[in-house]
Image: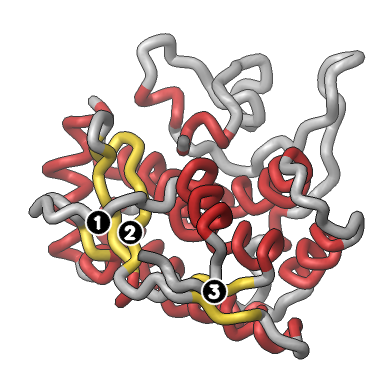
C-alpha cells in the first residue's frame, strides 16, 4: 500500500487518472525501468516484443510510440502528486517498473512503484522541485532516451518533444479539469517553476521542456489554437487509417486522439 502521506482518495485518484498500478504484478513480463537503460534490455523489449505488438515497420517507430507511453507513466503521476497534492513521488529508476495492463498488455501499461512513499515538497519549494526534476529527468528519463536513441536511432528531439507534449497538456488543460479546490494560481506557479528550471535538472545544457514552449496557432477559423509540433512522432506508421496527429508538422489536416487517450 502507498505511504499514508497520501490519502486513500488521492491514491485512487492517481490510479484512475494517471495509470499508477493498483496492484503489483508478479508476472515475469514486468519491465524494470533500469532495464531500459541498457542496450540489451531495450533491444529485446522494443524489437522483439513491442514492434510486433504495434505492427510497426521498425524499432525506431516503436521506440517513439513507447516513449510517449513511458513519458506519461513517469511524469503524469509525478506532476499530479506534486501540484495537486504537494507530495513528491519517488520515480527514480530503481523504484519504478512498467507493468502490463491486464487487458491491453504493454499497449497501455501502468507504472508500478517498489517504495510507494512520498515526501512533502517543503517550504523551499523551488529547491525541492529542482531536486525532484533531477531524479526524474537527469537520472531516469534522459538515460532511457539515450538508450532508445542508441539502439533504434529514434532522434532525441522526438523523444523530448514526446515528453514535453504531455507536460503542456497536464499543466495547460488536464489539471484544470479536476475540482480539487486548488488556489487559482497554484497550477500556473508550478508550471512556470518547471519551465524556469535549469538544464542541469534534466542532464541537458538547456531545459528540454522549455525548448518546445512556442506560441499556439489557430489553423482553422473558430477552432482553438494548437501548438504544432516541431518533430513527427511517427504515429501515422502504426494506425490502419494512416492518420497523423492533429498537431503533426507533416500533415496539419490529420487527426488522432488527444494525448490522454493515447496513454489511458
Sooner in the amino-acid sequence: mark 3 or mark 2: 3
* 10 or 171: nearer the viewer: 10
Determine whether label 2 and label 1 are within 8 Å by CB: yes
> Which residue is pictured at 84% across the width and 25% down the height?
224
Query: In the picture, residue 260 is in which quadrant?
Result: top right
Instruction: Give coordinates of residue 206: x percent, y percent.
Output: 67, 74
> Which residue is pictured at 28% across the width and 39% down the height?
101
Determine whether label 3 and label 1 are within 8 Å by CB: no
Q: Nearer the viewer, mark 3 or mark 1?
A: 3
Gap between marks 3 and 1 measured at Cα? 19 Å
Instruction: Give coordinates of residue 169: x percent, y percent.
Output: 68, 44
Q: Disc number at residue 112? A: 2
Q: SS at mark 3?
A: loop
The answer to whether residue 160 shows anywhere in this view is no
Mark 1 surroundings: few (<14), some (14-19) or many (≥20) residues within 10 A: some
Gap between marks 3 and 2 measured at Cα? 18 Å
Q: Is residue 199 above or below residue 31?
A: below
Q: Which residue is mark 3?
A: 5
Q: Is residue 124 above or below residue 69?
A: below
Q: SS at mark 1?
A: loop
Instruction: Give coordinates of residue 25: x percent, y percent.
Output: 19, 53
Could you tell whether 162 is left or right of 23 in the image?
right
> Which residue is pictured at 35% across the width and 25% down the height?
238
Determine whether label 3 and label 2 are within 8 Å by CB: no
* 152 or 210: nearer the viewer: 210
Amino acid at each position: 500500500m502507498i505511504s499514508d502521506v497520501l490519502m486513500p482518495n488521492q491514491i485512487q485518484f492517481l490510479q484512475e487518472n494517471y495509470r499508477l498500478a493498483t496492484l503489483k504484478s508478479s508476472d515475469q513480463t514486468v519491465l524494470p525501468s533500469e532495464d531500459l537503460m541498457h542496450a540489451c534490455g531495450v533491444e529485446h523489449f522494443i524489437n522483439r516484443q513491442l514492434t510486433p505488438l504495434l505492427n510497426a515497420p521498425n524499432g525506431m517507430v516503436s521506440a517513439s510510440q513507447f516513449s510517449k507511453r513511458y513519458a506519461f507513466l513517469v511524469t503524469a503521476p509525478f506532476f499530479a502528486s506534486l501540484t495537486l497534492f504537494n507530495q513528491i513521488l519517488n520515480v527514480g529508476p530503481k523504484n519504478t517498473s512498467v507493468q502490463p495492463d491486464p487487458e491491453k498488455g504493454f499497449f497501455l501499461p501502468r507504472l508500478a512503484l517498489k517504495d510507494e512513499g512520498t515526501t512533502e515538497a517543503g517550504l523551499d519549494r523551488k529547491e525541492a522541485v529542482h531536486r525532484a526534476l533531477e531524479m526524474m529527468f537527469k537520472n531516469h528519463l534522459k538515460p532511457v532516451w539515450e538508450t532508445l536513441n542508441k539502439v533504434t536511432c529514434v532522434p532525441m528531439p522526438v523523444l523530448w518533444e514526446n515528453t514535453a507534449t504531455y507536460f503542456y497538456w497536464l499543466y495547460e488543460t488536464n489539471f484544470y479539469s479536476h475540482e480539487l479546490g486548488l488556489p487559482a494560481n497554484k497550477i500556473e506557479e508550478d508550471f512556470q517553476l518547471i519551465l524556469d528550471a535549469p538544464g542541469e535538472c534534466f542532464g541537458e545544457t538547456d531545459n528540454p521542456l522549455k525548448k518546445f514552449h512556442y506560441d499556439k496557432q489557430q489553423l482553422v477559423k473558430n477552432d482553438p489554437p494548437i501548438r504544432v509540433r516541431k518533430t513527427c512522432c511517427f504515429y501515422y506508421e502504426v494506425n490502419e487509417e494512416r492518420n497523423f496527429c492533429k498537431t503533426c508538422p507533416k500533415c496539419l489536416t490529420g487527426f488522432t486522439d488527444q494525448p490522454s487517450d493515447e496513454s489511458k
